Image (spheres, helix red, strand yellow):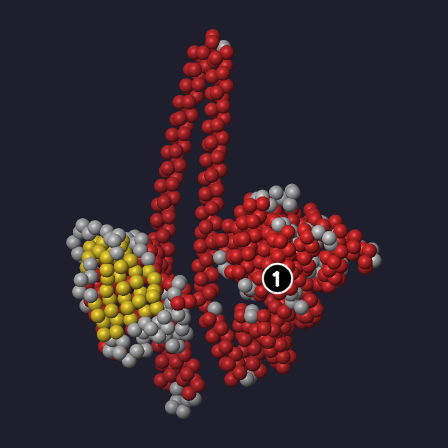
Amino acid sequence: MPDTLSPIVRCRFYPLSSYLQQKVPLMFTKTYATGKILATLFIFSLPLAQVMAQQAVIDSLLIVLEEMNTDTGKVNILLDISWEYHNSKPKETINYAQRALDLAESAGFGRGKASSLNMIGIGLEVQGELDDAKTYFEYALELAREQGNKKMQRGCLNNIGLVYERQGSFNLAMEYYNQALGMTDAKKDPGMSSILLNNIGLIQGSLKQYDKALEYLERSLAIERRRGDKLGIAMAMNNIGELYMDKKEFEKAEMYFHESIKLSEEIEDRMGLGIALCSLGEVKMEQGDLELAAKFFPQAYEIAREVGDKESLSHTLNCLGKVAGKQKNYFKAIRYCREGLTIAKDVGARDLVKDIYGTLSETYAGRGDYIRAYEYQKAFKELNDSLYSEDKSRRVIELSTLYDMNQKDAENRLLKEEQAKNESMLQRRTIISWSIVLVLLLVSIIAFILYSSNQQKHAYSRQLEQEVSTRTEELRESNEKLKRSNKELERFAYIASHDLKEPLRNIVSFTRLIDRRLPDNTSGEIREYLDYVIKSTHQMHLLVEDVLEFSRIENLEIKKTAVDLNEIVRSVSGILGNSLQERKVQLHIAHDLPVVAANASHLFLIFKNLIENGIKYNRNPQPHIQVSWKNAGEVNQFIVEDNGIGIDPEFHDRIFGMFKRLHNREEYQGSGLGLSICKKIISNYGGRIWVESAEEQGSRFIFTLPVVPVTVESDVIFEV
């Protein structure tokens, strides 16, 4: 199940007002005569009161608000009402928090202002306005630091980490979570500690670091057990169950889901019960027990509809459609999926929309309606392509996060060793100081004490020298291993790309054989399918080539020689000669391009990609491209200008990312790696690249290279 649809619970932070902790339970008991006391308001993103209905809680808070005489008390009650709405009506959350903020500012209530900003951020985060939410959390964090409010600081750090996690920046999210965890005393604030352990564990699970993820989630579960918080226990068990389901360990996952269901029923937690029932149904569906799965999903559907959780409702309808389709009840499967598709589009859950397209395609194919099956499969592929670059970027970020985490572990080990050395040194210095005091008091033994101290210093110096020598040798061996590893990775990328290209060539060859052997009266639709296969295979071949080139650049050691850029650009012009002639492109090259210290193949790639883009993205009947340069002090500035389709300023930064495309592959071919390769090379030389452009007004790509003295003869690699 995709991470975006996984019913795991990530925890937000909201500090409960001391007034509500003391007053609201008594008020509930008196007003509703239930005989039960609401002891706390949970800080998890689930329904707040497990005994009272949400509207009853809000009505009671509104009564308290009317009777409140102080501005600070009103701010706290407004914030509690705002929190009550955050899962069901985030707009109301923002409205009430804004009222609290206005009142706190007029009353000079600093802590209330910080809490109000934090709550507005929560409302925006639930609505999906992540950048705005982060701005409010950061402002609240700044105020909390000025006020010395440690609890609010931890909460804001957690909420900022949650935003970064939703944006796919796992390394930044981990940084904020760990910063908050380092400020948290598990004994004094076990709830906050549990939240952070839970959120860190979920990131580890997203990165497939299952052992570490289980370690954090089980620590969170242990804290909730000690607190006796059944809601927290149920949530932690559900998250651990999801982790085991992702690992395909279905028996363990089923055990945790059953426990979560049992606890949710005890405390009447309807949302938690619905999530666990849906997860258990998916386990049964994976195990092939469709009859039992068909019993769990309807229960989860009714609960999701009851609590108004639209995303869970859409996900459950998709699961019901899958089960019905596997049971060959195609009419019911289509009805479920269409209802789920409407809801998914309404809430903007694109991954869920894509999955439902896939289910509908399989259902219509099973029914024998291949035309509709093809339409939904085509819709599935188009949406999947639009998410392709985002998914690739997320994987790169995941790999970067894993590397950063391993680096930090190594740094922590070195810091501990350094700390141990410092403590040893401090201890020895203390001994020496006491020895000096004793020498002053006991003149008769001065010589003995000095001699003893001197001997200890020499011994310690020899020990330190030995340790430094040992550490130096270990670092040298580590560097050698790292160099070998980089070479092996580069060789692996080359072999992998070679092995990928061979089957791609076979696919193209045999597809063309099939096309030639088809009878003349074959429908155009079949030939369209074959043409689509060939185009997709060519695109895959291009992608493999560019990924290999990018990996080479990442690991290539720069060996600089004197490179005449006039020769380089002429070589590029020769290689692109056919394309220039076909499009009748006028290529103007400055005759005074400088000689620079660089790697000729690197500069060839830069100019080839930029000139090739000027040809490719150009609909002008008389296309022209101009290459020029100028000296700007410490750097040389190079310009490649065209009269092509131009680029909207909104996308100027985006185009230099890996796999970032502004057009579909049918309109313009390419892998989306050309400009990212240029940026990587130029960055390695200490330069930078940017674009000046507007739609339908052409583009000016500008990049800089530091001016470095040239001390060797020119070395041009490329000849036409």
Instruction: Out of 12 and 261, give the one closest to the viewer.
Output: 12
Q: Which residue is outermost to the bottom? A: 521
Image height check: is 380 above or below 222? Answer: below
Q: Which residue is outermost to the left? A: 713
Q: Secondary structure at mark 1?
A: helix
Q: Is residue 537 visible?
A: no
Q: Residue at x 33, y 73 (%)?
A: 697
Instruction: Out of 20 and 12, give the one closest to the viewer.
Output: 20
Image height check: is 512 above or below 250? Answer: below
- Can you give x and y, in whole percent of width and height, for residue 326 in the image? 61, 75
In the displayed structure image, the side of residue 429 where residue 600 appears, left or right: left
- Can you give x and y, in whole percent of width and height, for residue 570 in the image? 20, 67
Dividing the picture into quarters, in which one does residue 676 lie? bottom left
Q: Which residue is outermost to the front? A: 106
User: Which amino acid is tagged 1?
Assistant: Ile
In the displayed structure image, the side of residue 615 where residue 61 appears, left or right: right
Quarter that holds the C terminus:
bottom left
- Can you give x and y, in whole percent of width and height, for residue 78 in the image? 67, 57
Dividing the picture into quarters, in which one does residue 293 lie? bottom right
Q: Residue at x 54, y 74 (%)?
A: 358
Q: Residue at x 38, y 44 (%)?
A: 478
Instruction: Out of 697 and 2, give the one closest to the viewer.
Output: 697
- Can you give x and y, in whole percent of width and height, for residue 53 in the image? 74, 62
Dot 1 corresponds to which residue? 94
Q: Residue at x 47, y 8 (%)?
A: 444
Judge the density around disc 1: few (<14), some (14-19), many (≥20) Cα neighbours within 10 Å. Answer: many
Quarter that holds the N terminus:
bottom right
Instruction: Out of 415 and 374, give the one closest to the viewer.
Output: 415
Q: Is residue 417 visible?
A: yes
